[in-house]
Image: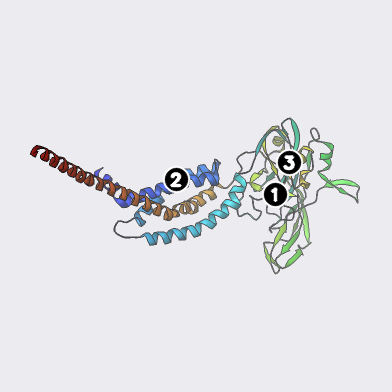
Amino acid sequence: MKEIKEFMEQKYVKHYFWTEVQGLAAFVIINYLLFGITSAVGYIYLWMPVLFLYMIFQLALCWNPNFNQRLIFNMCSCSVFVICLPTFAWFYLNVFSPIIFLDLKQVENCVASGILKTSLDGIEAYSLLYVEYTQEGNQYLGSACLTNQFQANYYNLVSPFRFYKYNDTFDCGPGIVDQPITKTNNKNSKNEFQKSFYDYDFNQEKYKPYGTQSQIVIGVKGEYNRNSNQTTSYNNKYGYRYHPYPYYGKSDYGICLQNYTFSRVKIPTWMCGQDTQDFKTLTTPKTCYVLYYGWDQNMSQQNAKNYQNQREQSELAVISFDKDIYYPKRVLTFIILFFYYPLILSLNSFFQYSTDWAFEKVEKRKQKQQSNPNDLNEYSQINNNQELSLIQNDQAQ
């Protein structure tokens, strides 16, 4: 205990301690500003023992009573800051914050009444699910989704954290395209809504299922079409599908990009449910959560209330059956340990100077307190001498 007490009383240890205290205070404030009270902040605090381990490394490597290593420490901190900030900022702005900060509102009696399936160039089997729900006593129509990539990696060719708009592009895949299978529930659906599931075939004068994902590909040097040679097959899950020749991303034209044309808005993959769900379970009334997506949220809600075909709207009601939207927690852990924590600790380069300032103020105050008693003794001695001389003068008289 004596050794520990002596160690803690050393000036360089105190300097390190108060620098880290300021860093931890900044850590808590930054966490609140960036992550609020979302589930992501729990993962950040869960791994704090690793942060304390990093702090001990800082003490061992950078706070030394015998050598001035401040220049080396500042250079290392600056390098860590420059490397970690862009990486963390990209993940935060592009991957996590668009998902974890969605303004979801709880609604009731959510029932699936129709589904359209497609394949996004063989990368993702994506299903647009029509969901009727009740909010404040009114009936609405929203859009949910199912996918075989509901826990996709963030680097998936179709970005799982992103809303795609009509004609937005994604990297090409193998090129499998599915004809959609449609299912409707006539019991609760409006007539106009039922017609919205179909395109009109003017040749046969009847309604037919919507068409498939576009095959137009945009290259760096211009536009071109995929080879039209194809074979057709039938799958019980996806219906009729055709297979253009395999295409894996590069050609003489440059990087291959595919247009999204299945709907006006593609819901992020991480908001979707797993496509292996039994459709009957989706027709059972349950609680769900709605996001009114688009520039005008009032228009989104009005479109949902009017049972507008969600597939053709840029402002729509997006439905999630889970309030906690999926995001890859392993990737978040990796970002926390190797980018976010070092980024926080690099701020100690600034806090060490505020600690210097505080220590300097404390030293000056101590010196002043030490000098004041001497001044007081001298003042008292002068007064005593004056009083003694007055007494002596009185006695002489």
Q: Is residue 203 above or below residue 247?
A: above
Residue lying furthest front in this view?
397
Residue 121: image quadrant is: bottom right
Q: Position of residue 297 (x, y in %)?
A: 71, 43
Cα separation, mark 1 vs mark 2, equals 46 Å
Residue 25: mark in rendering: 2
Residue 303: image quadrant is: top right
Q: Residues within 10 Å of mark 1 (few under 14, many from 20)?
A: many
Q: Is residue 385 left or right of residue 141?
A: left
Q: Residue beneath label 3, please?
A: 298
Residue 57: mark in rendering: none
Q: Amino acid at mark 1?
A: Ala
Q: Amino acid at mark 2?
A: Ala
Q: Position of residue 115 (x, y in %)?
A: 75, 42
Label 3 sits on a secondary structure element that is helix
Label 2 sits on a secondary structure element that is helix
Residue lying furthest left in this view?
396
Q: Is residue 289 left or right of residue 382?
A: right
Q: Residue beneath label 1, please?
A: 125
Q: Quadrant of the C terminus?
A: top left
Residue 242 versus residue 340: which sits nearer the camera? 340
Could you tell me if residue 85 is visible in this image? yes
